Amino acid sequence: MKYLIFTVSTICCFSAFSQVDQSALKKTQDVLRDSSKRSSHIEASSPQAKQALELLRSMGMSKQQEDALFDIAADSFGSMMNSVNGDTSKLKKQLANGMSDPKSFIKNMDSRSIDRIRELSSQVEGLNKNERK
């Protein structure tokens, strides 16, 4: 689960933007949910997110699970942006704290997102355990 929490915080970091409005938030969430757009963006500007995704893929994460992860990230990013009233400096601080302390990051998430991360984590970890057998 800690890999998924770290990955969600990493993904949200690459999504941070300076001029916050609902249109920009929607565009960011669209990039997170569209696999071709996000792949291009990650390749171009987010080596940490790329590395985290490679780790999860090496653990057996499927394309469907990857899409679910980014859907969680998109929802979380929106919730976090709303929780800081669009203040990007507060958001960046929250995200930076999440990179170094995933437990603190998850405390800022809603219970639905936490449940979705737990479910996805158990699926990926289950795949990894089956490969070791």
Image: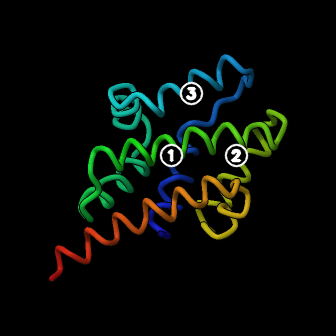
Question: Which sits earlier in the primary sequence, circle 1 or circle 3?
Answer: 1
Q: Is residue 20 placed above or below 110 in the rendered structure? A: above
How far apart marks 1 and 3 lie (CA) works out to 11 Å
- Element assignment for label 2: helix
On the image, the x and y values in percent for residue 35 come to: 35, 31
Position of the C terminus, as image quadrant, is bottom left
Question: Which sits earlier in the primary sequence, circle 2 or circle 3?
Answer: 3
- Identify the amino acid type marked 1: Ile
**Figure quadrant of residue 103:** bottom right
- Identify the amino acid type marked 3: Thr
Question: Which sits earlier in the primary sequence, circle 2 or circle 1?
Answer: 1
In this figure, which residue is indicated by the disc labeled 1? 11
Mark 1 vs 3: CB contact within 8 A? no
Q: Residue at coordinates 81% horizontally, 43% vertically from top-left?
A: 83
In this figure, which residue is indicated by the disc labeled 2? 92
Q: Residue at coordinates 78% horizontally, 41% vertically from top-left?
A: 89
Q: Residue at coordinates 53% horizontally, 46% vertically from top-left?
A: 72
Left/right of residue 1 with respect to residue 59 in the rendered view: right
Give the colouring mode of the picture.
rainbow
- Identify the amino acid type marked 2: Lys
Q: Is residue 42 placed above or below 69 in the rendered structure? A: above
On the image, the x and y values in percent for residue 58 come to: 23, 61
In this figure, which residue is indicated by the disc labeled 3? 28
Foreground: disc 2 or disc 1 = 1
On the image, the x and y values in percent for residue 90 come to: 79, 45
How far apart marks 2 and 1 lie (CA) works out to 12 Å
Q: Is residue 71 placed above or below 130 in the rendered structure? A: above
- Element assignment for label 1: helix
